[in-house]
Image (spheres, rainbow, N blue to C red):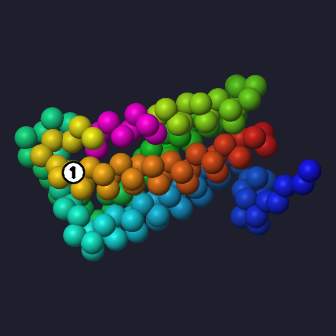
Amino acid sequence: MSTTITAPARVLASRPVWFACAAAGLAASAATELYGLAARAAGVPMQAGGVGAPAAEPITVGMFAMGTLICTFWGTVLALVLARFASRPSRVFVRAAVPLAVLSLVGPVAAGDTAVSTKVMLCVAHVLAAAIVIPVVARRLARS
């Protein structure tokens, strides 16, 4: 059985783990930022509060990308540790990253003084970022 690997996937498979993580993070940051801009243009309220906050604060341009990059940084740290110490780093990474991505949905869902449409939009942004980063990093770790 042969598998077809796209050119970018082949390039990432031969690069260091941190490089694949950085590339996935940049792609996810761009995707989530564009998604946020589209939501803004569609009229989704761009204000959210923290968990239990009495008042919402504005979600400014760049916050989607920044949040995605911060989470990708910590995912990279996890991937590097697993690449070094785990016998099956890809499997362990997916088993850790998916529950962490689900856990990240608690913030938007529990956000105080936030419109439901904004909560849904933020949850979709979390899923979008995870759907881009987790498979790329897992594929790279499978080649370790």
The residue pinned by badge 1 equals: 116
Answer left or right for 129 relative to 19. Answer: left
Q: Position of residue 86 (x, y in %)?
A: 70, 26
Q: What is the magenta range?
A: 101-108
Answer left or right for 6 relative to 77. Answer: right
Q: Amino acid at mark 1?
A: Val
Give the farthest residue toward the bottom.
Answer: 41
Looking at the image, is 102 positioned above or below residue 1? Answer: above
Residue found 45% across the figure and 49% down from its top: 127
Q: Position of residue 105 (x, y in %)?
A: 36, 40
Does residue 67 show up?
Answer: no
Quick check: is 106 in the magenta stretch? yes
Looking at the image, is 140 positioned above or below residue 36? Answer: above
Residue found 34% across the figure and 64% down from its top: 36
Give the farthest residue toward the right.
Answer: 1
Does residue 2 show up?
Answer: yes
The quadrant of the image that shows the C terminus is top right
Quick check: is 143 in the magenta stretch? no
Residue found 73% across the figure and 59% down from its top: 9
Residue found 24% across the figure and 56% down from its top: 117
